[in-house]
Image: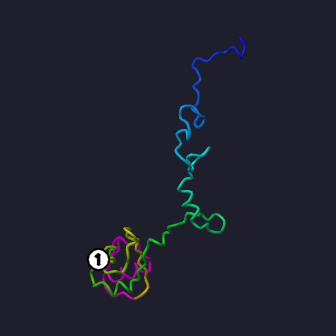
């Protein structure tokens, strides 16, 4: 037996060829004109256009897709402001800060709140659900307040 005498178990299936006459005629089932009617047509992905519109950032290893930074979705408040806005013994949470218009929501997202130690504090406050600096924590606990 030689190579040209070998027969396959399954017959080869002919690939469907479009646009070569036959029973389809004229546009061969491709509609009229446009990108889809052309030979070798391939639609350009929409995401590519979006990426192309974003400005390329300069520098080595800088990603083009740096839309959101951590600082964009965070709020900073000093204890001096808390001293003015809150009464002694009140609870300070991101929700109460939002009600008193000390922080703003970004879209539907509640920002992460950090309390810093700038300013004077002379009230006992209960702070929950906020990040806090060491100096602010010392000032609050010195007056008998709590930080959780």
The residue that label 1 is drawn on is: 91
Image coordinates of residue 30 in percent, x first then y, are 53, 42
- Is 43 included in the stretch rendered in magenta? no
Residue 120: x percent and y percent?
Answer: 39, 88
Q: Is residue 5 left or right of residue 109?
A: right
Q: Is residue 48 above or below residue 134?
A: above
**Quadrant in which the C terminus is drawn:** bottom left
Q: Quadrant of residue 60?
A: bottom right
How far across and how far down the image is residue 19, in percent?
59, 37
What residue occupies the far top of the structure in this picture? Answer: 1
Which is nearer the eye, 11 or 116?
11
Q: Is residue 85 above or below residue 69?
A: below
Q: What count of labels does the image hold?
A: 1
Q: What's drawn in magenta, residue-wise?
A: 120-148
Q: Residue furthest right?
A: 2
In the image, 44 versus 112, the foreground residue is 44
For residue 13, what is the image quadrant? Answer: top right
Q: How is the image coloured?
A: rainbow
For mark 1, does the 10 Å Cα neighbourhood hold few (<14), some (14 to 19), or many (20 or more) residues? some
| Residue 117 vs residue 144, the one in the foreground | 117
Give the vertical position of 121 relative to 108 (above or below): below
Check if residue 132 falls in the magenta segment. yes
Query: Would you place residue 83 above or below residue 127 in this image?
Result: below
Q: Is residue 112 left or right of residue 96?
A: right
SS label for mark 1: strand
Q: Position of residue 37 (x, y in %)?
A: 57, 46
Q: Quadrant of the N terminus?
A: top right
């Amino acid at each position: 037996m030689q190579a040209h005498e070998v027969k396959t178990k399954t017959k080869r299936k002919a690939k469907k060829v479009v646009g070569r006459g036959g029973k389809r005629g004229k546009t061969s089932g491709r509609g009229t004109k446009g990108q889809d009617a052309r030979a070798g047509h391939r639609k350009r992905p929409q995401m590519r256009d979006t990426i192309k519109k974003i400005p390329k950032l300069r520098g080595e290893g800088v990603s083009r897709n740096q839309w959101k930074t951590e600082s964009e979705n965070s709020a900073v408040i000093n204890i001096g402001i808390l001293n003015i806005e809150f009464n002694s013994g009140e609870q300070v949470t991101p929700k109460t800060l939002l009600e008193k218009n000390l922080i703003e929501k970004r879209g539907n997202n509640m920002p992460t709140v950090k309390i810093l130690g700038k300013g004077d504090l002379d009230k006992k406050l209960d702070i929950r659900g906020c990040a806090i600096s060491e100096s602010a924590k010392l000032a609050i606990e010195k007056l008998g307040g709590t930080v959780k």
